[in-house]
Amino acid sequence: MVFGSIGRFFGRIKSGLAKTRSLIGDALRSLIGRGRTIDRAFLEELEDTLLAADIGVGKTEAILEEVQGKWKAGEMAPGEELLDLLKRSLRDELSNDAGQEDFAWNPEGPTVILIIGVNGAGKTTSIAKLAKRLSDQGKRVLLAAGDTYRAAAAAQLSIWAERVGVDIVKQHEGADAASVAFDAVAAAKARGMDAVIIDTAGRLHNREDLMRELEKIHRVIQRQDSTAPHEILLVVDATAGQNAIQQARIFSHGMRVSGLILTKLDGTAKGGSTIAIRRELGIPVRYIGVGEGMDDFQPFDADAFVDAIFGDEE
Ligand SMILES: Nc1nc2c(ncn2[C@@H]2O[C@H](COP(=O)(O)OP(=O)(O)OP(=O)(O)O)[C@@H](O)[C@H]2O)c(=O)[nH]1
Ligand SMILES: [Mg+2]
């Protein structure tokens, strides 16, 4: 598997997930590879390893139960077989029903993608990366500077728009975010765009204000297109662990989140939290961010992800 894009894809997530690999893959390999028999002490070490890898209490318990069941039935040896069980279990947890397509594109007009998440999660950067990805596919993308709260937000998005080579709709600082979103969807329709990606503020005066603003954006977009937004992607910083889960819950109560973008999986050993986040929120992971550059972004693929954290070449 070394041709062009697939090889590059694999290389990038592998290098992005290097620290996670050493925490999960290497730790499990060394635990399993010591020629031990499965006994209570082994199971305890396995439990500690899985918990230390941030995959979460729920998933850790489920794995231990399965291993224990097989052990008692005499069906399990601690070797490749156990490693295979772990990989399969993680893949099953992470796999999405959706295929490899980015979106169900709106056939009637622009596909409207609303990006939400707490401040600093990586929304604006992820928008740039997604815009780059879609425009590389030949799609015409428009960005909307819907974060009118933070002073430099629109400027930051403009710089990205220029770098990526896409258009942007913005207003003055302090403008009504919903009005920016409304204008952007109108402009995308008028200009025959394929997609409009709307940035939003991560923080307002308080959480209620933030949720109210997001709801207003949502309502106003629907005045332009009653089927919009077609995607609501929640951006989550993977390094935030339990905090990330808590934040994501708040957003997903207020809005019908259609997918997660997990950011900052590079440079952290907390990649295992992807499993905990996916499991606890029940929302599919759609993309992952593995760096600050506009190409450090991949559609989420459970198989590739698990292979990358176990250090498999194939
Ligand atoms: N290493 C790494 N850094 C990232 C990634 N995604 C975003 N960042 C960095 O995280 C910081 C915050 O990113 P932003 O995109 O500005 O986050 P935001 O959610 O838009 O933040 P607010 O606009 O303040 O709400 C920036 O320094 C980004 O470069 C990633 O996948 N990996
Ligand atoms: Mg931002």
Image (tube, rainbow, N blue to C red):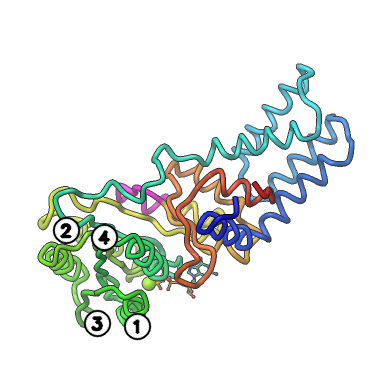
Q: Which residue is identified by label 3?
A: 173
Q: Earlier in the sequence, mark 3 or mark 2?
A: 3
Residue 147 in picture, x, y percent from top left: 29, 72
Foreground pick, 121 / 89: 89
Q: Is residue 213 above or below residue 25?
A: below
Magenta stretch containing residue 15, yes or no?
no
Q: Earlier in the sequence, mark 4 or mark 3?
A: 3
Q: Which residue is identified by label 2?
A: 221
Residue 68 in picture, x, y percent from top left: 74, 26
| Left or right: 308 as drawn, with respect to 35 | left
Question: Which residue lies at the image location 79% right of the left edge and 37% below the top edge?
Answer: 44
Give the class, few, some or many, for how many residues have Cα within 10 Å of label 2's Cα (few <14, many ≥20): many
Q: Earlier in the sequence, mark 1 or mark 2?
A: 1
Contact? badges 4 and 3 (CB < 8 Å): no
Question: Which residue lies at the image location 52% right of the left edge and 41% below the top edge?
Answer: 94
Residue range of the region highlighted in magenta in the rendering: 247-259
Question: Which residue lies at the image location 16% right of the left edge and 65% below the top edge?
Answer: 188
Q: Mark 2 falls on what kind of element?
A: helix
What is the spatial separation of the Cα atoms under label 4 and label 3, in whole angstroms?
Answer: 17 Å
What is the spatial separation of the Cα atoms under label 1 and label 3, in whole angstroms?
Answer: 8 Å
What is the spatial separation of the Cα atoms under label 1 and label 2, in whole angstroms?
Answer: 24 Å
* Amino acid on which disc 3 is placed: Glu
Q: Which residue is identified by label 4?
A: 214
